[in-house]
Image (cartoon, rainbow, N blue to C red):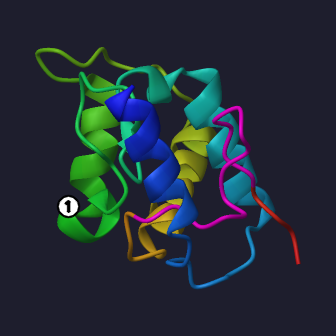
Amino acid sequence: MAFALYSVAVYRQGGGTDGSPADSRVRAGMEAWQGNNCQSCHQFYGLGGYMGPDLTNVASQRDEQRIRTFIRYGTGRMPAHDLSDADLDALVAFLKWVDASGSSQVPDSAVHWTGSYLINER
């Protein structure tokens, strides 16, 4: 119950994104994120799995090569992901796009009530 109330409170705070439109590479990265079930372990904006860290601002906290290495080769608890170079590029672009929001507050337009992340084209 507490998690549900917290989720609603975070969702209703809104704001946070810079409003930059998502290009096709960012959308492909979101598809790679969802297709590899990253959200089952990781979070954006405090929402998602809890086995791995929140990745909302990972692109500003770690250099790109380190992010690529973690995704490609995994760690003790995180499995390695055999992504194509194009999918890896797209996933990194998606992480940078999420990072650009600069906030762990969920904007009203960013998450569907089912928990799916929405990317609006402009």
Q: Is residue 67 left or right of residue 39?
A: left
Q: Quadrant of residue 36?
A: top right
Name the residue at the right extreme.
Answer: 122
Considering only vertical position in the picture, is 47 above or below 95?
Answer: above
Q: Position of residue 16 (x, y in %)?
A: 49, 78
Q: In this view, does 116 lie to the left or right of 91?
A: right
Considering only vertical position in the picture, is 102 above or below 56?
Answer: below
| Residue of label 1 | 62
Q: How crowded is mark 1: few (under 14 residues within 10 Å), some or many (20 or more)?
A: few
Q: Give the range drawn in magenta.
A: 105-118
Q: In which quarter of the image is the C terminus?
A: bottom right
Q: What's the residue at 63%, 46% (across, down)?
A: 29
Magenta span: predominant SS is loop
Q: In which quarter of the image is the N terminus?
A: top left
Q: In which quarter of the image is residue 103?
A: bottom left
Is 2 included in the stretch rendered in magenta? no
Considering only vertical position in the picture, is 27 above or below 84?
Answer: below
Q: Is residue 6 left or right of residue 121?
A: left
Query: Is residue 63 visible from the viewing direction of this image?
Result: yes
Is 111 included in the stretch rendered in magenta? yes
Give the camera-side residue of 45 and 119: 45
Q: Which element type, helix, strand or loop, lies under badge 1?
A: loop
Amino acid marked by disc 1 = Arg
Q: Where is residue 72 in the image (x, y as percent from the top left)?
A: 35, 30
Q: What's the residue at 33%, 63% (across, down)?
A: 59
Q: In this view, does 71 lie to the left or right of 37?
A: left
Give the camera-side residue of 79 and 100: 100
Considering only vertical position in the picture, is 113 above or below 64?
Answer: above
Q: What's the residue at 43%, 40% (across, down)?
A: 5
Q: What's the residue at 47%, 20% (across, down)?
A: 82
